[in-house]
């Protein structure tokens, strides 16, 4: 116990002498910086812009970090580092008077800063800005780099969906009525090198415009292209299957109920596919071409159902055919044209039926009409695929 007390007294004596080495003494540079900050902020009015400048030129440079396009809410969101540089004559000094200090760091709440307002903002009252400090040079040049989240309106155009291209614009103006700031771009206006992709869109083009004398002084239009490879894979395949489902029943016997059932199944599949597409689409002023394809394919399927009933009536007729019907039937089936008739169903011979010859002529006529309809359906589908199927547009941004 006595030895522990002696040890504590020993360390108590050593502590004051050694602990002085750990004390951070202020340097001369810190002292000058503190004096400079005190002098410049003494009579500085934060809400007042520089008075001795007729208009305040503010150079702006954007660096895009993340972006997103919500086509359902027609909203484009961008998280951007916004570098703003201007001159404030109230913040000038001679470095020789302050120990050679030529730069000063201040809080943005301690000085006047320009108000860069997003004109086409989704919510005019919403403003998210993250800025820690600004740098001031001895010539009065101030630079602030806030991290700002911009949300602007951007209405989707889906005529070429899923290979659609959207143009989203950010429009900026001076939001401070007390000042007359003139905003101009610095350099190439916006850097896209560090932008994080992977949200379903790629930025293909940037078009900056500036007009300091108008209400909208700065605007940047970003051309977005959808990452459509996954959507195309799940759209083109089903469309091809739907065309097969509509065409296949035409190759079946018109008197077979399987043909009618297959056509009805194809019709149900079309509407099911429409519900599937609805999961990926939102309401828009433009109608995607693939919906026109499905619409026309449904019309073809319904036509096939009614045509099946008509052909069934023709194939089962027993009365004496018209002269032109017999002429067409004989011309086709007693020439090379018989090899172009597909499918071909014949009347089962019945020696007790005296009208079997008439039935064969009507059945041949139904075969001819069915083959012509098959060719028409194939041609129509080729046109539909060429016209409405989504395809990669040429690069013309």
Image (cartoon, grey):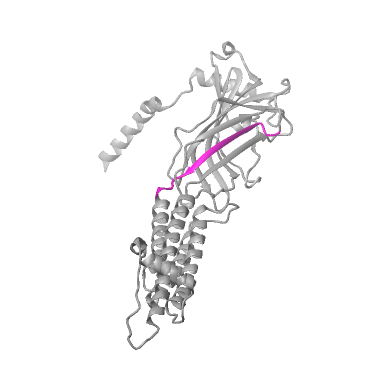
Q: Is any atom of residue 116 visible in this view?
A: no
Residue at the bottom extreme? 352
Q: Nearer the viewer, residue 192 or 155?
A: 155
Q: Is any atom of residue 190 visible in this view?
A: yes
Q: Residue at x 48, y 20 (%)?
A: 27
The answer to whether 267 appears left or right of 40 in the picture is left
- The x and y percentages for residue 265 are 42, 71
Q: Nearer the viewer, residue 376 or 22?
A: 376
- The x and y percentages for residue 335 are 35, 63
- Where are the magenta residues, as a range? 215-229
Q: Quadrant of residue 93?
A: top right
- The x and y percentages for residue 33 are 55, 21
Q: Nearer the viewer, residue 298 or 43?
A: 298
The answer to whether 271 appears left or right of 150 in the picture is left
Whether 226 is among the magenta residues is yes
Residue at the top extreme? 96
User: Which quadrant of the figure contains the N terminus?
Assistant: top left
Q: Residue at x 61, y 43 (%)?
A: 127
- The x and y percentages for residue 290 are 49, 55
Q: What predominant SS class does the magenta segment belong to?
A: strand
Q: Quadrant of residue 247?
A: bottom left
Q: Residue at x 44, y 69 (%)?
A: 327
Residue 99 lies, with reference to residue 76, above or below; the image says above
Residue 170 lies, with reference to residue 20, above or below; the image says below
Whether 221 is among the magenta residues is yes
Residue 332 lies, with reference to residue 358, above or below; the image says above
Number of dots carrying numbers: 0
């Amino acid at each position: 116990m006595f030895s522990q007390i002696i040890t504590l007294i020993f360390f108590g004596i050593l502590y004051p002498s050694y602990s002085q080495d750990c004390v951070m003494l202020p340097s001369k540079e810190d002292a000058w910086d503190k004096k400079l900050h005190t002098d410049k902020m003494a009579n500085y009015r934060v809400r007042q812009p520089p008075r001795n400048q007729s208009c305040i030129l503010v150079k702006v440079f954007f660096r895009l970090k993340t972006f997103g396009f919500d086509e359902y809410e027609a909203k484009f969101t961008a998280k951007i580092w916004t570098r703003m540089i201007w001159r404030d004559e109230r913040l000038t000094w001679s470095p020789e008077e302050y120990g050679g200090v030529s730069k000063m760091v201040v809080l943005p709440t301690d000085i006047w800063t320009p108000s860069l307002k997003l004109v086409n903002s989704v919510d005019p009252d919403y403003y998210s800005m993250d800025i820690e400090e600004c740098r001031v040079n001895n010539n009065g040049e101030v630079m602030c780099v806030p991290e700002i989240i911009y949300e602007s309106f951007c209405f989707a155009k889906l005529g070429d969906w899923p290979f659609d291209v959207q143009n989203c614009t950010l429009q900026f103006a001076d939001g401070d009525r007390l000042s007359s700031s003139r905003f101009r771009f610095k350099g190439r206006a916006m850097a896209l090198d560090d932008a994080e992709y992977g949200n379903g869109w790629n930025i293909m083009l940037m078009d900056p415009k500036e007009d300091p004398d108008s209400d909208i002084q700065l605007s940047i239009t970003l051309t977005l292209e959808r990452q459509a490879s996954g959507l195309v894979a799940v759209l083109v395949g089903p469309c091809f299957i739907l065309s097969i489902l509509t065409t296949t029943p035409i190759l079946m016997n018109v008197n077979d109920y399987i043909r009618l059932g297959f056509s009805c199944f194809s019709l149900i599949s079309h509407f099911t596919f429409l519900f599937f597409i609805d999961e990926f689409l939102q309401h828009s002023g433009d109608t995607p071409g693939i919906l026109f394809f499905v619409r026309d394919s449904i019309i073809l399927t319904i036509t096939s159902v009614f045509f099946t009933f008509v052909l069934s009536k023709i194939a089962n007729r027993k009365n004496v055919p018209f002269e032109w019907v017999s002429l067409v039937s004989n011309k086709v089936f007693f020439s090379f044209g018989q090899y172009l008739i597909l499918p071909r169903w014949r009347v089962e011979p019945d020696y007790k039926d005296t009208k079997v010859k008439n039935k064969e002529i009507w059945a041949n006529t139904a075969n001819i009409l069915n083959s012509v309809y098959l060719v028409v359906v194939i041609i129509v589908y080729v046109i539909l695929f060429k016209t409405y199927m989504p395809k990669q547009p040429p690069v013309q941004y």
